[in-house]
Image (cartoon, rainbow, N blue to C red):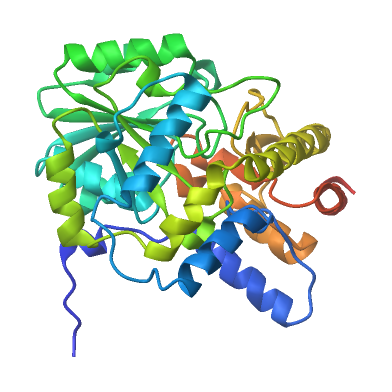
């Protein structure tokens, strides 16, 4: 019997990186040692104070539904985080706790993007964004960006590409896959340009906290109270498997987000929310700062090693935990593009990386992403393996 699947589902492509991960697991099962630099998940465990808070919640029987927008005390704690970290006051009523940042993105797209209306995205960028838009039957205009733009959309892009069918622009700072960060001035310019078009600006800030060289990424909430900000407990706070994020909305949008949350996922996981209350404690933040410093050391270790092999990385990332590298100099008749390179390195060097095709179309065949989410010794070993098979 032929299976009938909705066109919106057929239009959503899988992650190529998940295929690479599956292949890597098969090779490991066959006895080959693989260094994983493909998936954007830190190797650190969730900080112990957060784990203990989650366990205590279970022991105390806190296993029932919470309000759809999240525990009031967690929403207050997140509001306190904005005041402490950014000196920005946010009414806790504007904060919607979600099942991961993905839940927040689904709410944003569902609430703001009409059928066949368009969202502007940077290419390269996080691949799921365009699929969320497609899922709500919106459209995407992927704007080619390169090192000259710091791989980010600008106010000039808004002026150039916005048309009568455009409803929204979505940017990420720090970004995946490039790790670049928008400055206060750049955020202000974007917010003003989108406001001029009577549209919506959504800013993905899920890598906030993971910035380097003494730089602190400004929140878009510091330039406008009309932006929608997505964040997560996954990356900086180390809670990937707990599936918890949040969304900050302008005044007047809480009710529609509450209604959508009730219907789409009812409420975020209760245990995860109680655990997250410990994320802002002093002892937890001390652990997280040590890990941020470790990520900075890892970036500083891997970056020159890759350049020495022949990868070009014109922009040193100021945040996240990725290096987006131009591999053109390493391509050949036998290895014609980044997808072939990723396959070659996996099988011949035992190093798993992500091809640029996962992040868009612009120059995708000549770029790949390295996640420095492994110990420095493994990063050095991975570079040595790559160098051996590529240049001898």
For the N terminus, which image quadrant? bottom left
Residue 119 spot, x, y in % from top left: 23, 34
Q: State the image quarter where residue 272 is shown.
A: bottom left
Say whether residue 361 is visible: no
Say whether residue 44 is visible: yes
Residue 113 spot, x, y in % from top left: 15, 39
Q: Is residue 274 left or right of residue 47?
A: left
Work out whether 262 lies above or below 109: below
* Numbered marks: total: 0
Residue depicted at 65% across the width and 69% down the height: 24
Nearest to the observer: residue 86 or residue 207: 86
Q: Is residue 95 left or right of residue 149?
A: left
Nearest to the observer: residue 73 or residue 101: 73
Residue depicted at 70% across the width and 75% down the height: 27
Work out whether 142 lies above or below 281: above
Residue depicted at 84% across the width and 54% down the height: 385
Q: Residue furthest bottom?
A: 1
Q: Is residue 167 left or right of residue 248?
A: left
Q: Residue furthest right?
A: 392
Nearest to the observer: residue 299 or residue 241: 241
Q: State the image quarter where residue 312 is shown.
A: top right
Residue 66 spot, x, y in % from top left: 28, 60
Work out whether 275 lies above or below 257: below
Nearest to the observer: residue 153 or residue 147: 153
Q: Is residue 203 left or right of residue 69?
A: right
Residue 43 spot, x, y in % from top left: 68, 56
Work out whether 200 lies above or below 332: above
């Amino acid at each position: 019997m032929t299976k009938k699947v909705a066109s919106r589902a057929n239009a959503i492509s899988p992650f190529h990186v998940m295929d690479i991960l599956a292949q890597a697991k098969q090779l490991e099962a066959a006895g080959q040692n693989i260094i994983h630099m493909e998936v954007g998940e830190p190797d650190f465990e969730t900080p112990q104070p957060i784990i203990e808070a989650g366990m205590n919640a279970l022991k105390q029987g806190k296993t029932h539904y919470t309000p759809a927008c999240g525990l009031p005390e967690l929403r207050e704690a997140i509001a306190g985080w904005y005041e402490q970290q950014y000196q920005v006051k946010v009414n806790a009523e504007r904060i919607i706790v979600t099942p991961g940042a993905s839940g927040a993105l689904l709410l944003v797209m569902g609430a703001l993007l009409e059928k066949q209306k368009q969202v502007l995205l940077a290419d390269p960028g996080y691949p799921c964004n365009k699929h969320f838009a497609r899922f709500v039957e919106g459209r995407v205009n992927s704007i080619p960006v390169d090192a000259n733009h710091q791989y980010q959309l600008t106010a000039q892009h808004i002026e150039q590409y916005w048309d009568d069918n455009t409803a929204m622009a979505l940017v990420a700072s720090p970004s995946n896959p490039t790790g670049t960060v928008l400055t206060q001035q750049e955020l202000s310019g974007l917010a003003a340009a989108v406001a001029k078009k009577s549209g919506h600006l959504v800013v993905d800030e899920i890598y906030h906290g993971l910035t380097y060289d003494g730089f602190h990424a400004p929140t878009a909430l510091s330039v406008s109270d009309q932006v929608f900000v997505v964040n997560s407990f996954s990356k900086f706070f180390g809670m990937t498997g707990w599936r918890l994020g949040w969304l900050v909305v302008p005044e007047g949008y809480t009710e529609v987000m509450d209604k959508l949350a009730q219907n789409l996922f009812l409420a975020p996981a209760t245990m995860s929310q109680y655990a997250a209350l410990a994320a802002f404690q002093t002892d937890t933040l001390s652990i997280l700062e040590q890990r941020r410093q470790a990520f900075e050391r890892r970036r500083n270790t891997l970056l020159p090693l890759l350049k020495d092999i022949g990868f070009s990385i014109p922009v040193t990332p100021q945040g996240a935990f990725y290096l987006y590298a131009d591999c053109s100099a390493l391509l050949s008749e036998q290895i014609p593009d980044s997808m072939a390179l990723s396959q070659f390195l996996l099988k011949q060097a035992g190093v798993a990386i992500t091809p640029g095709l996962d992040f868009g179309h612009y120059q995708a065949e000549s770029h790949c992403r390295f996640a420095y989410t492994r110990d420095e010794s493994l990063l050095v070993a991975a570079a040595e393996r790559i160098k051996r098979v590529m240049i001898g």
